[in-house]
Image: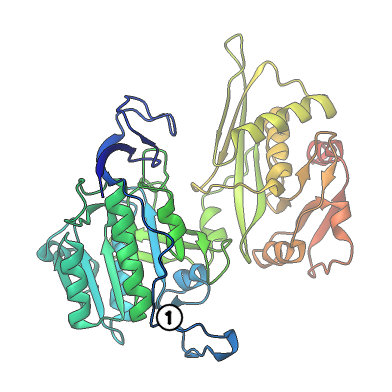
């Protein structure tokens, strides 16, 4: 085979025969790395003999205990009920967000019954033990190795035959037969492929830690996310103790579930009631409304704050944190057109308290209610919750899983819920909860002003 050099982008995997300063794929600067690739044509007509036999699905058997609990209920919820044998799980997140802390706590919980190998390419064995002692998660039966060579790691796995392997991180792994630096696209792809074969053949559950780019996406080739069975993102503001573990891909469970944690001096602590945590410190000032959003099968209540102030410049300023900025601009346009509110001379700032990121359209009504309250300086009652999607005509569209939302609202002691009228068909309303059905945005404006 003839080898030739190609330039491959470390961010998106774009390939080009010549070096260029700016990648056409992701618009990143100085991300193209020279890599030697094979350019030989394989003889695809040759039939390869294999000892593996084709089986019918009815002939395949498996152990009923295919999942094992991690000892962390929030993590089990995200994984779909527990850790699946032979699965390959990719954990990504910003530096310092708590990825290694989460994995060490998993070692403490599962290590009592399972054999675990922790492979670190970034820290020495002594550093890992010091950090484990600080967190109080020292497990005497945990196997540690500080190594970057994939072949040596595979030999260690073959020698001790562990049940669970943790690779921290995949960007530091290196294969000598590939002529490129650690963290490059070929190195990351081939190292992940080698670990995937071991996980499937030996029935080993494997966690792989992945670095993220400045845009928040997992570094390396996009094929990395396609190869693994589960992709977990660790989100949250490092200045806050609030952490969210979200599954963006899961072959063995739902991708809508989230796990909520709080970062403390002793590591991550599970938050069983995130709504109460998000609503702590709430004041009854104008421009504040409560919304209920669904995160998988769990209803989460959050506070949306709106600050509406007269602008001191020619063009009013718009800012949004925690919700989509374009969605906020859309809601402001609907309020001006359908509710006759003049917002052209006001700066509008929208914030979701607690650092939560909400992408659901069911919070449209909460955004509009906060803006109306802030503009009129009329506080919304503290026991009122808003849910509903707002259309461009000012109409309110139905929301999904309304019964679960109302149940969560009633459980936390709220007395009134403003929801779209069309969503109330065949819905069981909890006892003691007053549900107001509205069909247009101007009705909500009237409710807030009368209050």
Res. 82 in view: yes
**Is residue 95 or residue 59 the one in the foreground?**
59
Q: Secondary structure at mark 1?
A: loop
Quarter of the image with the C terminus is top right
Horizontal placement of 333 versus 294: left or right?
Answer: right
Q: Residues within 10 Å of mark 1 (few under 14, many from 20)?
A: some
**Is residue 38 or residue 203 the one in the foreground?**
38
Res. 141 in view: no
Q: Residue 140 appears at what percent x and percent y?
A: 17, 81
Residue pushed farthest left?
126
Identify the residue shown where x is 31% and y is 67%.
195
- Residue matched to label 1: 69
Q: Residue 90 appears at what percent x and percent y?
A: 39, 61
**Is residue 274 or residue 228 the one in the foreground?**
228
Q: Residue 47 appears at what percent x and percent y?
A: 42, 70
Identify the residue shown where x is 44% and y is 62%.
45
Identify the residue shown where x is 35% and y is 47%.
220
Q: Residue 444 appears at what percent x and percent y?
A: 82, 41
């Amino acid at each position: 085979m003839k080898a030739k050099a190609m330039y491959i982008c470390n961010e998106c995997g774009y390939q080009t025969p010549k070096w260029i300063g700016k990648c056409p794929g992701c618009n990143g600067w100085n991300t193209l790395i020279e890599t030697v690739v094979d350019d030989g044509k394989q003889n695809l007509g040759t039939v390869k003999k294999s000892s593996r036999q084709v089986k019918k699905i009815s002939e395949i058997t498996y152990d009923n205990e295919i999942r094992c609990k991690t000892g962390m209920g929030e993590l089990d919820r995200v994984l779909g009920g527990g850790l699946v044998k032979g699965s390959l799980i990719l954990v990504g997140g910003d530096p310092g967000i708590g990825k290694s802390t989460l994995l060490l706590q998993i070692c403490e919980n599962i290590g009592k019954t399972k054999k675990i190998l922790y492979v670190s390419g970034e820290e020495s064995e002594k550093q890992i033990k010091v950090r484990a002692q600080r967190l109080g998660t020292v497990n005497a039966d945990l196997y540690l190795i500080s190594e970057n060579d994939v072949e040596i790691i595979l030999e260690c796995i073959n020698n001790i035959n562990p049940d669970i392997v943790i690779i921290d991180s995949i960007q530091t792994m290196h294969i000598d037969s590939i002529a490129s630096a650690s963290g490059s696209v070929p190195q990351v792809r081939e190292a992940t492929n080698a670990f995937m074969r071991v996980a499937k053949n030996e029935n080993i559950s494997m966690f792989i830690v992945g670095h993220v780019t400045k845009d928040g996406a997992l570094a390396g080739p996009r094929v990395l996310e396609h190869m693994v069975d589960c992709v977990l993102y660790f989100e949250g503001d490092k200045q806050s103790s609030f952490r969210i573990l979200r599954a963006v891909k899961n072959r063995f469970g739902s991708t809508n579930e989230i796990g909520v944690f709080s970062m403390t001096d002793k590591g991550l602590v599970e938050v069983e009631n995130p709504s109460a945590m998000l609503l702590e410190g709430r004041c009854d000032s104008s421009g504040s409304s409560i919304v209920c959003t669904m995160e998988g099968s769990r209803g989460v209540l959050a506070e949306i704050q709106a600050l509406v102030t007269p602008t001191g410049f020619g063009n009013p300023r718009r800012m949004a944190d925690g919700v989509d900025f374009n969605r906020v601009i859309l809601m402001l346009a609907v309020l001006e057109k359908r509710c006759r509110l003049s917002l052209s001379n006001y700066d509008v700032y929208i914030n979701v308290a607690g650092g939560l990121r909400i992408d659901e359209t069911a919070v449209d009504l909460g955004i509009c209610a906060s803006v109306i309250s802030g503009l009129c300086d009329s506080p919304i009652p503290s026991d009122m919750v808003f849910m509903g999607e707002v259309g461009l005509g000012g109409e309110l569209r139905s929301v999904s899983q309304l019964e679960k939302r109302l149940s969560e609202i009633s459980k936390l002691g709220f007395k009134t819920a403003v929801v779209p009228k069309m969503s109330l068909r065949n819905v069981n309303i909890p006892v003691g909860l007053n549900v107001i059905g509205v069909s247009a945005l101007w009705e909500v404006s009237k409710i807030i002003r009368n209050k």
